[in-house]
């Protein structure tokens, strides 16, 4: 399949090239720092940002895509069906 954008360097505002399912964990980092998070089922989203700051986003709606550079999704997260986008 042809990809006419293959020779361009991706930027943080470019569409995601990769994705992976996320299982919240207080001890394990994600397989890579995200460019964004997709929330399949709404709820609270507790994360550790790339710089180590811990934040909780309350009542994130279902279907949200949040442009966050996250290294960990914490267990107190009540949102579900999370996907890391890179």
Image (cartoon, rainbow, N blue to C red):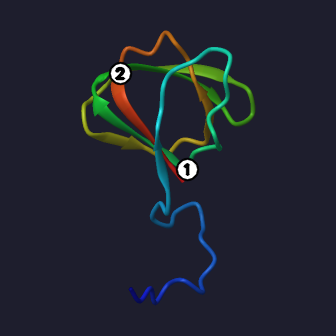
Q: Is residue 3 left or right of residue 25?
A: left
Classify 7 as above or below 10.
below
- For the N terminus, the image quarter is bottom left
Q: Is residue 34 left or right of residue 52?
A: left
Question: Label 2 belongs to which residue?
Answer: 79
Question: Label 1 belongs to which residue?
Answer: 35
Of callouts 2 and 1, the N-terminal one: 1
Classify 25 as above or below 71.
above
Measuring from the top left, give residue 55's x and y in whole percent. 57, 21
Residue displayed at 59% across by 83% down: 8
Which is nearer the eye, 61 or 28?
Answer: 28
Give residue 33's quadrant in the image: top right
How many residues crowd around disc 1 within 10 Å: few (fewer than 14), some, or many (20 or more)?
Answer: many
Q: Is residue 5 left or right of residue 80?
A: right
Residue displayed at 37% across by 44% down: 65
Which is nearer the eye, 58 or 43?
Answer: 43
Measuring from the top left, give residue 57's x and y in whole percent. 45, 22
Q: Secondary structure at mark 1?
A: loop
């Amino acid at each position: 399949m042809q990809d006419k954008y293959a020779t361009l360097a991706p930027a943080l505002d470019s569409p995601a090239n990769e994705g992976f399912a996320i299982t919240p964990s207080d001890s394990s980092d994600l397989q890579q720092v995200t460019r964004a998070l997709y929330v399949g089922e709404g709820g609270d989203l507790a994360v550790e940002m790339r710089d180590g700051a811990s934040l909780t986003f309350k009542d994130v709606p279902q279907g949200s895509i949040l442009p966050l550079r996250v290294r960990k999704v914490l267990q107190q997260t009540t949102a579900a069906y999370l996907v890391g986008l890179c």
